[in-house]
Image (cartoon, rainbow, N blue to C red):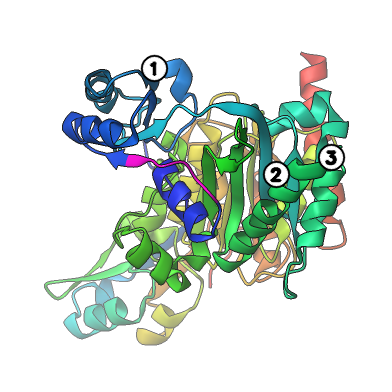
């Protein structure tokens, strides 16, 4: 679950991290009043769950409350990357001596939260890590034990920060780590963390994302502290036409489960995969052998022929798809013959030769002998569990690459 | 786009049971994938569902022996 900046700022505040005096406003009049209360120059920021606000004109500076109201009026009407703003944040224009970066992310490899700190804040941390790796400090914290300040201090000190700045930044990074764990975040980021000209450290901007599965147990934060309505699900993911079509096929028939994802996949090999971790394994096996998946579509739980057919057709009709690979792990009760019928039928209905279109069929399991008879009848290459998932994926890749090379 | 029916399976019933209301009702009841429909006492085959046949043989048991035919078109055998 993603949070708007004004909510992330509130979370930071709740954790005891200093922030500048800010106001969340939904009308120009509220923005004017907030600017008056803050006093002095302010910055007006669109509250949208997307990046690129500055470039799109969603962040403007104002010297007077009147100007703040004018900017707020314009920003409230401004759509950014398909998102209308929830409101605007009115923030004082801070006198910054130096900008830092402080965050905690989940390290899936180490299975522990990872603190990140940089003395080069205000820009993308990825860019800093690439161009100035010595300016990024890293340190894991425990999932269970209390998080001591000294671990944050070590992380910050690794970037060369010393003295008063080190002492002031240390409790802030430690508090970010604690809030990350307490609120089940997947990302807790303050960027920039500003050192003001008077030496104080304040969070000027914050970005928070919570584990979706934790929403149920974080009701106090979500409903009481942040006043987020239960139906405000913040769906950050916009489904593609392919994903929506597959979801509609799945919803129309209770038998079995299919799902399709294709964000970021632009390859020529369509995947119809599944079973007990098989999907990820098979996708990796395809990619690691040079294949280019066109999608990530799972099938299982004994779908109907129509459902398997519908999924395969959607995959085959994706731009750039030349062949499909139908593969599963062996941990499956899904009937081989039913899936075979479905994917072959998809080819036939699209006027394609199943033997040419299905690069490999590797679904060991229930009714496989019956399935193999069908596959043989249509000249589809298939294999049983004596052929590993890696090898089956490799055969599919070789077949599609062989054709590409011959063309 | 054209939907192809009866690509893998063919199902037929003998004329002797086609108008039998009791058998029509029974066939509709037992088939897990709705291949049979009780159409006002007639046995009707729903072509759109025939390829969904899961080869369970419940229809064969619900009707007198030899009156329902389920043929696998991919190998030419009959249940």
Provide the residue span drawn in magenta. Answer: A18-23
Q: Mark 3 near mark 2, Cβ–Cβ under 8 Å?
A: no
Question: Closer to the N terminus: mark 3 or mark 2?
Answer: 3
On residue A288, the disc is: 3
Residue placed at 82% from the left, 17% from the top? Answer: A405
Are marks 1 and 2 in one subunit? yes
| Pointer 1 local density, CA inside 10 Å: few below 14, some 14–19, many at least 20 | some
The residue indicated by pointer 1 is A57
Please name which of the two marks, 3 or 2, marks the residue nearer to the observer. 3
Q: Chain of mark 3?
A: A
Residue placed at 63% from the left, 34% from the top? Answer: A294
Under circle 2, the secondary element is: loop
Q: Quadrant of the C terminus of chain A?
A: top right
Q: Chain of mark 1?
A: A
Is A225 magenta? The answer is no
Question: Closer to the N terminus: mark 3 or mark 1?
Answer: 1
Extreme-top residue of the structure: A407
Q: Position of residue A197 (x, y in %)?
A: 61, 30
Please name which of the two marks, 3 or 1, marks the residue nearer to the observer. 1
**What main secondary structure does the magenta stretch of the protein show?**
loop
| Quarter of image, res A193 | top right
Is A21 magenta? The answer is yes
On residue A380, the disc is: 2
């Amino acid at each position: 679950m993603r949070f708007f900046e004004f909510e992330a700022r509130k979370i930071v505040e709740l954790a005891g991290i200093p922030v500048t005096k800010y106001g969340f406003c939904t009308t120009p009049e509220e923005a004017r009043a907030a600017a008056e209360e803050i006093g002095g120059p302010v910055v007006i920021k669109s509250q949208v769950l997307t990046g690129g606000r500055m470039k799109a004109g969603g962040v403007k500076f104002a010297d007077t409350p009147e100007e703040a109201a004018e900017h707020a009026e314009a920003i409230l009407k401004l759509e950014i990357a398909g998102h209308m703003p929830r409101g605007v944040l009115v923030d004082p224009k801070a006198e910054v001596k130096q900008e830092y970066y402080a965050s905690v992310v989940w390290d899936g490899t180490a299975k522990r939260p990872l603190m990140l700190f940089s003395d080069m804040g205000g820009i993308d941390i990825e860019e800093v890590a690439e161009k100035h790796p010595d300016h990024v400090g890293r340190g894991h914290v425990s999932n269970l034990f209390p998080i001591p300040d000294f671990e944050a201090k070590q992380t910050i000190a690794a970037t060369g920060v010393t003295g008063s700045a080190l002492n002031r930044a240390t409790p802030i990074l430690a508090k970010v780590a604690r809030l990350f764990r307490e609120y089940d975040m997947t990302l807790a980021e303050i960027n920039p963390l500003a050192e003001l000209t008077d030496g104080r450290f304040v969070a000027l901007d914050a970005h928070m994302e919570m584990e979706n599965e934790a929403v149920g147990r974080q009701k106090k934060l979500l409903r009481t502290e942040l006043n987020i309505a239960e139906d405000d699900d913040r769906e950050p993911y916009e489904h593609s036409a392919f994903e929506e079509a597959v979801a509609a096929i799945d919803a129309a028939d209770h038998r079995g489960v299919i799902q399709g994802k294709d964000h970021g996949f632009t390859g020529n090999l369509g995947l119809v995969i599944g079973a007990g971790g098989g999907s990820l394994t098979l996708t990796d096996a395809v990619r690691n052998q040079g294949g280019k998946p066109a999608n990530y579509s799972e099938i299982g739980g004994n779908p109907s022929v129509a459902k398997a057919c519908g999924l395969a057709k959607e995959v085959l009709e994706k731009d750039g798809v030349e062949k499909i690979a139908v593969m599963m792990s062996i941990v499956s009760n899904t009937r081989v013959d039913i899936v075979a019928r479905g994917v072959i039928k998809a080819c036939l209905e699209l006027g394609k030769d199943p033997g040419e279109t299905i690069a490999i069929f590797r679904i060991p399991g229930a009714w496989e002998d019956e399935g193999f008879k069908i596959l043989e009848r249509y000249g589809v290459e298939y294999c049983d569990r004596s052929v590993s998932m890696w090898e089956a994926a490799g055969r599919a890749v070789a077949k599609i690459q062989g054709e590409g090379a011959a063309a | 786009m054209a939907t192809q029916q009866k690509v893998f399976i063919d199902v037929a019933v003998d004329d002797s049971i086609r108008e039998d209301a009791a058998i029509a009702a029974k066939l509709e009841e037992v088939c897990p994938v709705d291949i049979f429909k009780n159409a006002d006492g007639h046995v009707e085959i729903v072509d759109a569902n025939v390829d969904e046949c899961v080869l369970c043989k419940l229809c064969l048991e619900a009707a007198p022996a030899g009156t329902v035919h389920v043929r696998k078109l991919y190998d030419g055998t009959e249940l």
